[in-house]
Amino acid sequence: NSVQFGHVKRASCCVCVWQRCCENVEGMKGALDCTASGGILTLASAPGAKAEGKEERRGEERHLDLKRKTSPVWEHFEMISSSKVRCLVCDKELLYSINPVHTQGQMIDEALVNMIIKDSQPFSPVEDEGFRGLIHALDRTYVLPSRQALKKMVDSKYEEAKIKAKAEMENVKAVSLTSDMWTSLNMDAYLAITCHYIDENDKLNTVLLGVEKYPDNHTAENIDLVKNKYMEEWEIKEKVKCLVTDAAANMIACAKILQVRHTIYIAHALNLMVKKSFDQVSALCDIRTKAKKIVTYFRSSTIAKEKLNQMQQDMRRPALKLINEVETRWNSTIRMLQRLYGERQAVGASLASLRTDTSPLYPQEYEVIEEVLRVLSPFQQATVELSEEKRVSGSKVIQLMKMIHHSLQGEQISHSLLNQSDRYRLNPAHLNEQIRETGEKNDIEAQAITIQVQKEAVTAPVQGSVFFSVDIKCIGIPTIGWMFSGTSKQQRIAAWTPGGSVNITQLYKGRVTAYPNGSLTISHLQLQDSGYHIITVTEPSGNSKDAGVLLNVTEVLYEDIQYLVVFVIVLGALAAFLMLCIWLLNKLYCYIKAWNLRRHLPEHNETELQPL
């Protein structure tokens, strides 16, 4: 190679030497691939170049010190400075970049660190045999860092991001802080502080200043010390214009100590308002408790879960799991009710075919859930809108509150919800009182009608009969109605007034017997009769109350087995009788044959001898 380059004329340009000997390395800034030596031409590979610092090791068993090949091209250049070289052929001076070269291994390192950070992955995958095999299959020359080395790489990435964020915040004139405290599953308290600011491009930015374990007492003074520490560390103490927290007393007192304007979470205030109002209505609390028991049953029982999946497949619905609620977040209750309402048919069919004490939700209760979801839908939309991170939400508060007020002002709760026609209005001063008064009124009205059901769940065989025994107490002569609600249809059964005629639908004629006390008998049961049978009692004043019985109709397989056993026994007895008859006939035949032989024998046993 040296002979080849030695014959280059001095009149030729050094660029020609460069182009003849080297090619750009794809994806690597400031690096050239020497076609003569096969090595990578960088400043570090130049003779006489002083390294700024040795590359830090990435682990004990990681990144062996491989000696980089020196390109013969450097035999025709000499270093003038750290950024300039002189061509020995044409005496031209060229600029040379000192940017570090990102080799293939370094790029994989960076991708690995980004995966750990963005996906919140642990450091342990680098020690897993399967993951190491995958990386080895992708690049056989790459050596995975150890767990400790990967942790150092992530810490280094954090420091780089922190320095970059601090540099951006130096040009910011004002910032706002949000802070919250929570308790982990291990009962450890944590305090998080987040900074929000608008950069020079009018873009909203968010920086997490820190998340710190908080073992001290949650007093305003202790919280103030932690927040002061972060504000001094990030050099934003004079730039903080607002502190946004929840309405806890220690957070409000901390803002006073910091002498910063304090604002509570608007979304948090909406959540508290809805949660407290929800808890004040006993009917809604009962439905919520009942729904939570159903969801818990399906999430804890493998048999129930498989049955629900089977019903969803039979109904050609996607296999969706039921969602349980979280006590501290009211929107989880809305999600639970939404999923349960959407899968009500599959859930009802599954409960009807399972042997469980879990009480199902009746159609009237599903109507209540539908009304509740419609009423609370504006609250959920406002919460989602106020929870956005990339857009300023403070300017939306007045419009969103007006939207909720307008929506509730025009929303009228139907009679099936809570036996009332009052309207919910978004009035923070009167909302809870209005709902409480409404709930007390409903409880008084409901006490006038009582329905006692002897059994909430009944099992009966096919072609059998079932008796729904109820006891009704009310004011005046009520109107009694029975209705069937199955997995795919709802059908009225009968309606009557005690002492009057009974109106039975065509489908149930000849199968239903009604009684003055409200009881009902259904005969000639079929599998399609499995489901909810609901009785509705309505007083002359218009007040009504419902109760239901869950009927499970089963095929009595043991009767078929009994018939089969009896048939086999009869066949066995018949076969035994025939065998006995054959045996007797055989005995009779043998007796007759012997008698005939004896009859033809001579009377004397003397034998006459004749001469030969």
Image (tube, grey):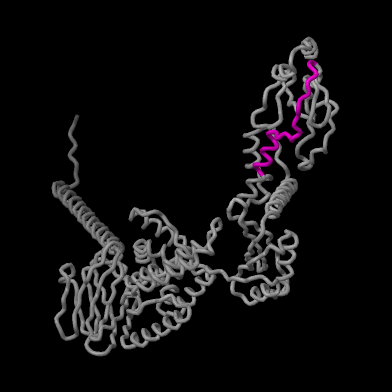
Assign the N terminus to one quadrant of the image: top right
Compare residues 596 and 443 and report the one nearer the observer: 443
Q: How many marks?
A: 0
* Residue at image coords 40%, 86%: 440
Coordinates of residue 364 in the picture (x, y in percent)? 32, 73
Q: Does residue 458 appear in this view?
A: no
Does 168 appear in magenta? no
Name the foreground residue: 524 vs 357. Answer: 357
What residue span does the magenta drawing correspond to?
89-112
Q: In the image, residue 134 lies at what x, y percent? A: 62, 38
Q: Is residue 111 magenta?
A: yes
Query: x, y (%) of residue 161?
Result: 69, 50
149 and 458: which is toward the camera: 149
Residue closer to the observer: 237 or 75? 237
Name, please, the residue furthest toward the bottom: 475
In the image, residue 132 sits, relative to residue 251, either above or below, namely above
Q: Quadrant of the C terminus?
A: top left
Q: Quadrant of residue 544?
A: bottom left
- Which residue sits at x=26%, y=81%? 537
Judged left or right of residue 389, residue 599 is left
In this view, 531 is above or below 125: below
